[in-house]
Image (cartoon, grey):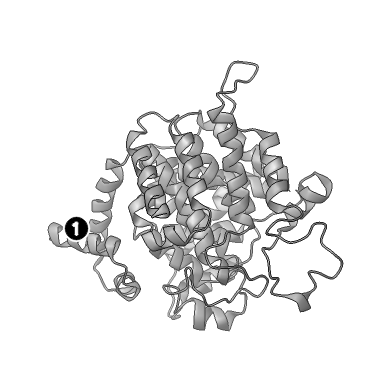
Amino acid sequence: MASNLAALREAIVTSNDAKFLQDVIDSDLSKAARDRLQEISVAETAARTPAERALASIIGGFVADAAVQSVQWVYDEETIKTKLHPQSAKLPFSEQHLCPFFKVGVGESTAYGDQARAALVAIHSAVTADSKKGDGSQSLFDPSAYESQLVAIFGNDSAYGPWPVPKGAEDKDKFPLPHKWRNHSIKSFLGTGKPQADDHQLDSAAKVPAIVASLHGIAPAQDILNTVEKIVGVTQDSDQAVAAATIAADVLAALLKGLRTKDALAAALDTNSAEQVGERVAEREDSEATAAMRKLIAEALEAWRNQASESPTPFVDFALKNGIGCRIPGSIINALAVFSESGDLGYEQTVQRAISCGGDVVSRSIVSGALAAAVNGVASIPTEWIKKTKGLADVVKLARDILSKHPNADSALKLADELLSTIEA
């Protein structure tokens, strides 16, 4: 039985047949069989080093961003249930463009991925320079490098069109825009040099994989969380945004330690099962907003697990109830629900699930996809997707340099070199 299940898992991981993968997800495997598949995956995860998991998470976030941008911000419920949900296996990197707000080439990044890229550059600038703070500790983040990257990526003469935006250039009759879409928080930063007040959107957590995976193993947990808060605060002045980013960071940190999906969520959300797992990611005093959000997410995920529905699209209905837009808390609940549902099945399946309920597909896919990649490894990210993601070679090189500072990073560096060979082939 075990050997058959191992063979099935290998087929799931290595198959490029989207219909086969979807059939496996939708199949009537017994609970015992699914549990055994997860046990096999636990052993696979334990065999990977933290640096390998970190590399997978970084790459998984950037690939997910590029994979789903053509279906971003679809809010029409009929379109979601008749196109996105049934065709989710075919939509990553699809030529079929459904996003009503902007249209760019296949494999291009979005504002979510580009903010993460700017954060990665800022961390690379600090970590590889071996710069020290006044107390002798390692500097983890170069604020000036981050801000200059944001200006270079999003400013005038960029892939985001002219800045300042000419009057009428973004009126609805111009949609979809023929260039990338600047988020409100980015516009606030470019226009005033200050963060957008009360910007309760999931831009914050979409940057987390690049930050946490880069710094895990080379800095204390609390210092990493402080860095997350500082980077979020450059563009978003929002306790809700920081809370969502903090919780996503805690889930990822638990995964990088080797926990599986269920246990990592328990550890981060501080539910009763976290005590059984014996893990709490960082001992600290939560802000009021973060404590409340942990409780809210835990309750929502528990409600989803206990939901009895005869609907043909129960997960879509659940996501719609939470709110499928960018706004927190619905956006972070849906992202972690996607990961909870599909993280152990694989990276590709997780991104497909993220697509299936529409709305802010990009940030949901980055967060859940990066977490699933940490669970399932670099090999779980389809080679074809890796090759189609524009600018990924630069990301891999930045990540490789940072990961070279990690302990026991040799195998991760080898994986990075293999990725570069694949991209440049």
Foreground of the two, 419 or 51: 419
Residue at 32 percent of width and 38 percent of height:
411
Q: Where residue 174 appears, x then y in whole percent?
A: 76, 75
Provide residue 103's location: percent of width, then percent of height. 63, 71
Quarter of the figure that contains the N terminus: bottom left
For disc 1, the marked residue is 6
> Number of callouts in the render?
1
Please name whichever residue, 194 or 302, is drawn nearer the observer in this view of the structure.
194
Q: In which quadrant of the rendered view does residue 167 lie?
A: bottom right
Q: Can residue 293 be seen from the camera position used here?
A: yes
3 relative to 172 in the view: left or right: left
Q: Is residue 171 above or below residue 58?
A: below
- Residue found at x 44% / y 58%: 339
Task: Report the side of 229 relative to 51 (left or right).
Answer: right
Vertically, is 381 above or below 127? below
Among all residues in the image, which is located at the extreme top? 135
- The percent coordinates of residue 63 (x first, y second) are 48, 57
Image point (39%, 28%), residue name: 407
